[in-house]
Amino acid sequence: MIQVEGVSKSYGSVQALRGVSLVVARGETLGVIGPNGAGKTTLLKILLGLVRPDRGSVTVDGLDLLNDPIAVRSRIGYVPQQDGFEERDTGREALTFLARLRGSPDDEILRHVASVGGESWIDRPTGTLSGGQRQRLSVAAALLGDPPVLLLDEPTASLDPRATASFRDLMSSLAADGRTLVLCSHLLDDVERLCDRVVVLLEGEIAAVETIDRTQDLPVRGGLESRFLAAVGKEERDG
């Protein structure tokens, strides 16, 4: 579904990505983890078409990102850490505006609101919604147009434990529907619970790739934190 080949990106003298190559299979949930400055955000921005790589190629669903960016973007939904909703707008108004931008019909709004469990609060101003409800609204927005790929950037970082557990259930249901998910997170518990594989980025390069055995209960699985630290080291690096 997603193929990244030899992607590099520099910002002046800072090399954010160094020849990164990875493949995400259709229906797979891939975690991307790494310390601050590892290149996670740059990778997401490249996949979204917001940043052009210096070298390398990206294809999504067989389409080349550089040659056909609009078609690629239509196949990707994005869930940011912090939404940009206008707090005076209701959730329905926010989704209606975004649906018109994407050319999605009104009945699709109702379908995605139901899929995220938002029927009881969709007509409230977004400024009155809880963090968990706003994240669910972000997911409904990302699902407009029914993209087969969802990119999620630290989606539970600001949520309390109950909202986090509820959001994980939502992500699991989206994965079960066959969507391809790419999850960037500092929260290794989220990654271990949700992902099939994990890519560890360090200084713009892939330091390790881990397969998560999801046939085991989480306490038996465990150990992702220790493997992450083994890949990146326990001490922060200067620069």
Image (tube, helix red, strand yellow):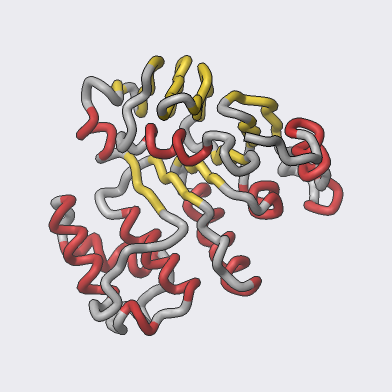
The residue lying at 27 percent from left, 68 percent from top is 110
The image shows residue 111 at horizontal and vertical percentages of: 30, 64
Which image quadrant for residue 36? Answer: top right
- Horizontal placement of 109 versus 135: left or right? left
Is 187 above or below relative to 203?
below
Q: Nearer the viewer, residue 200 or 10?
A: 10
Q: Quadrant of the N terminus?
A: top left
In the figure, 100 relative to 165: above or below? above
Q: Nearer the viewer, residue 130 or 118?
A: 130
The x, y position of residue 233, in whole percent, is: 78, 35
In percent of the image, x 33 and y 22: which residue is there?
Answer: 62
Numbered circles on residues, count: 0
On the picture, is 198 further left or further right than 134? right
Residue at coordinates 22% horizontally, 20% vertically from top-left?
A: 67
One can see residue 1 in this view = no
Q: Is residue 237 visible?
A: yes
Compared with 153, 30 (above or below) is: above
Position of 202 with respect to 22 (left or right) is right
- Which image quarter is the C terminus in? top right
Residue closest to the eye, 114 or 11: 11
Say left or right for 155 vs 53.
right
- Where is residue 158 shown, x and y percent of the image? 55, 67
Residue at the farthest right position: 220
The image quadrant that residue 91 belongs to is bottom left
Residue at image position (46%, 79%) is 130
